[in-house]
Image: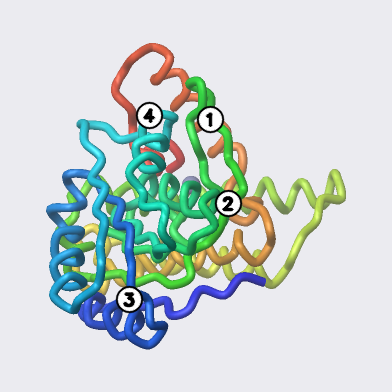
């Protein structure tokens, strides 16, 4: 079983990251972000690491809409140093998936630094990539550690936390599909993981108001529920605990919008 340690959620994410890097004697980093997430967090992380004597290569993906497609995957691959380094994924779903895939294929580890509570993929193993305008989820790797800065999450645009809430609410049908699959088709099922996923959904529903207000408490509940959902997938070995028919519909709409050259909609907005 993959262990992600530590999973830190709080207001001292950067200090905890620095302590972690010192404890593990990490020296070189490849930080992947986009222009928004670099402004929100990536630049601070780069500055703090360099101020502490670490070597940091930054890869800031540009463009209004970064998607995990061939162009952006290749940009990271071409700009990543050949020397061993630890990747830092600074962003939400897409940036994490790009970093997850490239670091895995280069034989490197990565650390997740979420900038918005918008999706549950931070702690999972699959990388949903868009190849030739078709969505494929490729088995890659989970991060070795995760540091979520609550101040950064609170400052993220509301549509992103709303999408994270939608990704959680969508799991009501995911769990129903999973249960049905186990009863009708004898698909693998895990009662404990089912209950954990269910508890994470209920936690979000009970905190609808604080999440809507983007309070410190609300953002903690939401990111911890999303992290829990990712861990359920990780522990089960596939996405069944967190993805059902609503995710298939979402992936179909995503490909349709791409093929028609229309603006993308957030994953959680489609799922929820
Ligand atoms: Zn999802």
Task: Residue 71: give its label.
Answer: 4
| Left/right of residue 264 with respect to residue 241 in the rendered view | left
Q: Residue at horizontal 38%, vertical 87%?
A: 23
Q: CA distance from mark 4 to mark 3?
A: 32 Å
Secondary structure under tag 2 reads loop
Is the CB atom of the residue marked by disc 4 within 8 angstroms of ligand 1's nearest atom? no
Task: Residue 9: give its label.
Answer: 3
N-term-proximal mark, 2 vs 4: 4
Which residue is labeled 1 in the image?
A: 135
| Quarter of the image where one finds residue 188 | bottom right
Is the CB atom of the residue marked by disc 1 within 8 angstroms of ligand 1's nearest atom? no
| Left/right of residue 168 with respect to residue 3 in the rendered view | left
Q: CA distance from mark 2 to mark 4?
A: 19 Å
Around disc 4, counting alpha carbons within 10 Å, would you say few (fewer than 14), some (14 to 19), or many (20 or more)? few
Q: Position of residue 77 (x, y in %)?
A: 41, 42
Q: Foreground: 142 or 240? A: 142
Q: CA distance from mark 2 to mark 3?
A: 24 Å
N-term-proximal mark, 3 vs 1: 3
């Amino acid at each position: 079983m993959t262990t992600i340690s530590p999973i830190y959620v709080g207001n001292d994410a950067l200090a905890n990251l620095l302590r972690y890097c010192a404890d593990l004697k990490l020296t070189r980093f490849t930080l992947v972000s986009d222009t928004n997430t670099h402004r929100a967090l990536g630049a601070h992380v780069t500055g703090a690491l360099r101020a502490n004597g670490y070597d940091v290569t930054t890869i800031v993906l540009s463009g209004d809409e970064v998607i995990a497609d061939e162009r952006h995957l290749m940009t990271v691959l071409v700009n990543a140093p050949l020397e061993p380094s630890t990747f830092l994924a600074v962003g939400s779903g897409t940036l994490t998936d790009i970093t997850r895939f490239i670091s895995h294929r280069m034989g490197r580890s990565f650390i997740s630094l979420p900038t918005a509570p918008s999706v549950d993929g931070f702690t999972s193993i699959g990388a949903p990539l868009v190849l030739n305008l078709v969505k494929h989820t490729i088995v890659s790797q989970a991060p070795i550690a995760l540091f979520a800065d609550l101040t950064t999450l609170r400052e993220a645009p509301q549509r992103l936390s709303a999408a994270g809430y939608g990704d959680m609410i969508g799991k009501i049908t995911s769990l129903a599909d999973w249960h049905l699959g186990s009863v009708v088709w004898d698909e693998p099922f895990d009662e404990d993981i089912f209950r954990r996923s269910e508890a994470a959904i209920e936690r979000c529903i009970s905190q609808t108001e604080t999440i809507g207000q983007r309070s410190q408490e609300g953002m903690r509940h939401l990111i911890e529920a999303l992290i829990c959902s990712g861990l359920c997938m990780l522990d089960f070995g596939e996405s069944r605990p967190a993805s059902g028919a609503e995710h298939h519909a979402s992936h179909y709409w995503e490909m349709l919008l791409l093929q028609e050259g229309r603006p993308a909609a957030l994953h959680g907005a489609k799922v929820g």
